[in-house]
Image (spheres, rainbow, N blue to C red):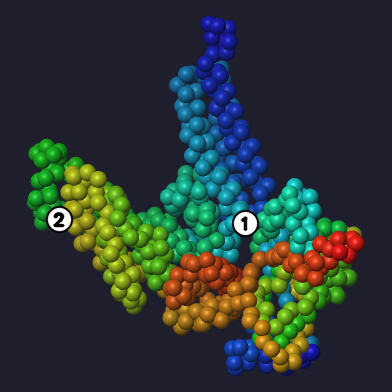
């Protein structure tokens, strides 16, 4: 089909562009497949992406010059969307092969995902240059069984920040356990109660939206959206805390201190998060240092009306929180996961103080907790003269992690 | 040279400072049963191969050419991680740095010598290490692995790759250990400049 200029029509050329873009994308997958994969999950992810890309290519190839404009446009839009979205993922997979990563951590974290989320779950650990953090907790259409967890590139071999991966893996558990559905009825009731309990906030927002029943329904929806997202974030914090013990608190403080910032409606306020963490830590028998979160500032909502919605959501969340904590801890305990033990942590700490790795097979949380304790008793190891000691601490933790894997593999086949 | 029983004694020494540390621990019963005077060490998972670069040459006496930056580990080599169960293929004529799986720490009273295993050497795998291990060394041992045979060789992380013989050192002046030097990856340390040698090469041909 040609245009009035004698050239092929715009529709034909648009389709050709989509085909070329997809071909380049598929070629790139083949290129990435030749990388050195330390773990097979990344390579398997490429196979899945390639399979779906080939299906999409078939759709494009089936479109003849006589195909309707609407069909061509839909196929082109779909191609553009998927290529754009999964190019990001290809980059993530490529970075997962970079030797800057501490590949030793994959084994214990993969076991955690298999135990706490699904025995069939896959894990890709990588790094990112724009640290958001990058995480896709089994939410990608083409990679539904894959949890993608990225650390910040300059610190992608830093064991001390790995407890934060516990939070990210928590998002996968939130979905796989369908906790949103589980909590919904109680949350709706809590919101209704909260709206009654806080008439000033309710009328403030309702007046802005209007005074009819529609306004109240919109308000309930807004509060529900905020509250359910907040509960998910709190669940993930508790998930990380239960698994990694006090090291989660240290890693959390390392990354987010001293709070402040703009308040998102989808996160608890920075002070509320800390309050929930401290309360849950005490339930677990962890006594955080009294000054650990000292002088933290709260995050502030950007818009006035948001503030009222958020206050209502916060109040509803506070009502649900005790049940959420119990659910979180029960889920993990039911899967046979236990917090780091004091005995093992002390043993690892004693080894690290001697500048040797643990040889008895500690868990990753025990090792990283001991690492944090040593770092803190050594004053933070941030000065120039501390660089060598700081580096060897990471080396010793990673070697301890590797030795645990070695022992588990050998004992599993004894 | 320490006997099997003495090695086990050093591994179980009550005093931390006098204890020989090998992690993962060698099988004590196996050591005693075999009665050998060495500890087998296993191959680790990190490798470092050499790559072609713009580096014109590398001085083995610690001299840096005037118009050149010091070639770093990163610019001259490429790292590889091989998971347990997979292998690294070392082709004939090729050379790669490997590392022991074990982290060692020798007390001030012990030194060691590392040698390859003859069963591997017969297939062409030569394992030359920093053969002498000084007292108070701490870390994983970098292994220089070369295939001098005629067929590619598969080497696996976790396989026994070399052995360490241990010797008791005479009591003498203790040196301050470099407590933070240990690494889990193979290292390519730059050669240290020797003062005497430097004076020799910097002297004028007429000896003035």
Say whether residue B74 is left or right of residue A151.
right
Front-most of residues B117 and A11:
B117
Where, quadrant-wise, is the C terminus of chain A in this rendering?
bottom right
Q: Answer with the quarter of the image where residue B80 lies.
A: bottom right
Q: Earlier in the sequence, mark 2 or mark 1?
A: 1
Tag 1 secondary structure: loop
Q: Nearer the viewer, mark 2 or mark 1?
A: 1
Image height of A74 relative to A249, above or below: above
Residue A99 numbered tag: 1
Label 2 crowd bin: few (<14), some (14–19), many (20+), radius 10 Å: many
Say whether residue A222 is left or right of residue A146.
left
Tag 2 secondary structure: helix
Chain where mark 1 sits:
A
Q: Answer with the quarter of the image where residue A361 lies.
A: bottom right
Front-most of residues A82 and A36:
A36
Chain where mark 2 sits:
A
Residue A168 screen position, x and y as percent: 43, 57
Residue at image position (12%, 42%) is A206
Residue A194 numbered tag: 2
Q: CA distance from mark 2 to mark 1?
A: 51 Å
């Amino acid at each position: 089909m040609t245009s009035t200029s004698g050239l092929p029509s715009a529709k034909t050329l648009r389709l050709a562009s989509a085909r070329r873009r997809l071909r380049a994308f598929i070629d790139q997958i083949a290129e990435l497949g030749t990388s050195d994969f330390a773990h097979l999950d990344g390579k398997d992810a490429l196979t899945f992406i390639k399979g779906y890309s080939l299906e999409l290519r078939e759709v494009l190839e089936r479109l003849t010059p006589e195909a309707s404009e609407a069909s061509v446009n839909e196929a082109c839009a779909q191609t553009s969307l998927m290529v754009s979205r999964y190019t990001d993922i290809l980059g993530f997979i490529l970075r997962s092969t970079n030797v800057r990563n501490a590949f030793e951590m994959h084994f214990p974290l993969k076991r955690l995902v298999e135990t706490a989320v699904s025995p069939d779950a896959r894990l890709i650990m990588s790094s990112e240059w724009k640290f958001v953090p990058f995480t896709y907790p089994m939410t990608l259409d083409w990679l539904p069984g894959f949890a993608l967890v990225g650390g910040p590139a300059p610190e992608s071999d830093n064991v001390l920040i790995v407890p934060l991966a516990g939070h990210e893996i928590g998002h996968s558990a939130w979905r796989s356990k369908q906790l949103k559905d589980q909590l919904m009825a109680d949350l709706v009731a809590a919101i209704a109660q909260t709206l009654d309990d806080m008439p000033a906030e309710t009328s403030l927002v309702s007046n802005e939206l209007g005074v009819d029943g529609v306004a109240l329904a919109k308000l309930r929806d807004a509060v529900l959206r905020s509250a359910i997202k907040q509960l998910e974030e709190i669940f993930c914090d508790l998930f990380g805390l239960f698994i990694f013990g006090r090291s989660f608190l240290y890693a959390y403080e390392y990354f987010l201190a001293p709070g402040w910032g703009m308040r998102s409606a989808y996160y608890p306020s920075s002070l509320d998060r800390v309050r929930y963490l401290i309360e849950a830590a005490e339930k677990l028998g962890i006594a955080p240092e009294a000054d650990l979160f000292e002088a933290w500032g709260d995050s502030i909502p950007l818009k006035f009306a948001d503030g009222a919605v958020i206050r209502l959501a916060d109040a509803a969340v506070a009502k649900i929180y005790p049940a959420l904590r119990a659910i979180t801890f029960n889920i993990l305990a039911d899967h046979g996961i236990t917090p780091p033990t004091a005995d093992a942590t002390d043993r690892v700490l004693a080894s690290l103080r001697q500048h040797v790795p643990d040889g008895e097979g500690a868990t990753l949380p025990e090792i990283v907790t001991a690492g944090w304790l040593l770092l803190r008793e050594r004053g933070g190891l941030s000065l120039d003269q501390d660089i060598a000691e700081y580096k060897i601490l990471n080396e010793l933790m990673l070697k301890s992690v590797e030795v645990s894997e070695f022992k588990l593999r050998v004992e599993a086949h004894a | 040279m320490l006997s099997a029983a003495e090695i086990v004694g050093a591994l179980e020494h009550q005093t931390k400072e006098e204890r020989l540390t090998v992690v993962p621990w060698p099988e004590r019963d196996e050591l005693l049963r075999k009665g050998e005077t060495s500890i087998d060490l296993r191959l680790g998972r990190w490798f470092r191969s050499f790559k072609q670069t713009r580096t014109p040459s590398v001085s083995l006496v610690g001299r840096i050419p005037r118009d050149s930056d010091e070639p770093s580990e990163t610019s001259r080599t490429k790292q590889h991680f091989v998971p347990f169960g997979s292998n690294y293929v070392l082709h004939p004529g090729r050379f790669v740095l490997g590392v022991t799986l074990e982290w060692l720490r020798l007390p001030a009273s012990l030194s060691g010598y590392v040698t390859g295993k003859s069963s591997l050497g017969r297939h062409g795998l030569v394992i030359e290490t920093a053969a002498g291990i000084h007292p108070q060394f701490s870390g994983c041992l970098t292994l220089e692995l070369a295939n001098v045979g005629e067929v590619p060789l598969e080497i696996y992380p976790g396989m026994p790759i070399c052995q360490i013989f241990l010797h008791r050192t005479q009591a003498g002046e203790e040196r301050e250990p470099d407590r933070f030097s240990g690494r889990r990856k193979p290292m390519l340390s730059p050669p240290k400049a020797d003062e005497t040698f430097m004076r020799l090469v910097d002297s004028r041909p007429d000896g003035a």
